[in-house]
Amino acid sequence: LQRKKRCMLLFLYICLIIAGVVVASFVLKFWLMYKPSANQAAEDADASDEISDTTASDMLDSDAADMTDGAVDGELPEPENVEAINTEQVDVAKEDEVTTNVVEEAIALADTADVEEDAVSPCIQLKITTTADKESTDITPWSLTRSGENESTIVIRAADSLSFDDSNTFDECVDSGVYTFHISDSGGDGLGERGKTGYIISADGIDFGVSTWFLDDEKMTFSLPLVDNINSGFCSDDFLLVIKTDNKPFQTRWDVIDNDYGETVLQGGPYSLPQAIYTQRACLSDGNYTFNMHDLGGDGVCCDDGKGFFSLYKNGVEVVDSNGQFGNKNSTVFVVSSP
């Protein structure tokens, strides 16, 4: 829509320029035609005064002498307005040339603007298809958000619950950025029978995120455009974190640090549901990372506050399987690389 508005404004700007040039050319042409006529009228008036002061015979003799002198010199006198007419033709030709140049420059500017806009801000066709159990009565709110400036979050789409038909589809052209698809289930059993329900995420026709199960809550974080848009395989298991909270879920936090740049690329918690299963999936770029699990109570996610745990998987392979006993913090280094 923004692109259409820019094109319309640019088109109106070009039309105004062309109209102004055409009007100016007509005004200039009229002025040039009028000026010689006025000069000629003044010369005719001067000639009339001279005629009144001289006799008709003297004027005839003078004209004859002028004609004779011209014939002897081999030149014939030209009409007095020939020079003005030639000047007018040159000016009109220059004006037409200027008009043509302005139009060509305006068209070239429009083409350049279109090319630059396409190169700077192409959109990505994002599609999320969610299939749920039609017989379920659970509430399954979901949302799609994009990370904004200063750690802000922009809501792209959200719903209080899925409509339990065969499928629910989000299919729109979106801007580049870091996105998170978030879905939860009030019954704690996900969207239904494993393998028959779940969601699939694709960008520009390439499937890259898939989940056939979750229990209480799940998030899928990914960047657009895809880092590797040649490989059409799923990447939902590049990073998979499964957490079961204890009875104090508000004490649990975690983050993933990109060791090459020192930036936090993923983070989660604190949580609200005790003894609940939270899962986090993500498509990560190739690199070296550190996963940090934190507990503000200093006793992990176990023991006196209830039995919890967390497990970390990379490309489907288990990296950490914790029984929840880690004190204040547990750190694990892992590497993501293309197969």
Image (tube, rainbow, N blue to C red):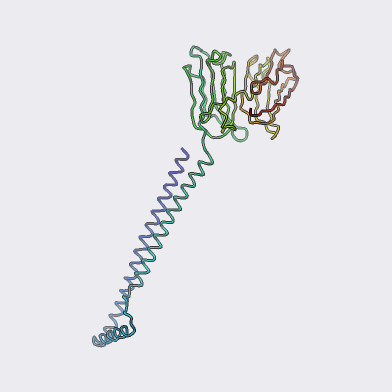
Residue shown at the point (66%, 28%) measured from the top left: 336
> How many marks on residues?
0
- Up the image or down, 168 lies above or below 260; here it is above
In the figure, residue 47 lies in which quadrant?
bottom left
Considering the image in quadrants, where does the C terminus appear? top right
Residue 128: give x, y in percent of width and height. Answer: 52, 25
Residue 70: give x, y in percent of width and height. Answer: 32, 83
Residue shown at the point (70%, 20%) measured from the top left: 320
Residue 310: give x, y in percent of width and height. Answer: 68, 18
- Up the image or down, 151 lies above or below 76; here it is above
> Among all residues in the image, which is located at the extreme left?
56
- Up the image or down, 91 lies above or below 52; here it is above
Residue 201: give x, y in percent of width and height. Answer: 54, 25
Q: Is residue 202 left or right of residue 48?
A: right
Q: Is residue 329 left or right of residue 222?
A: right
> Among all residues in the image, which is located at the extreme front?
339
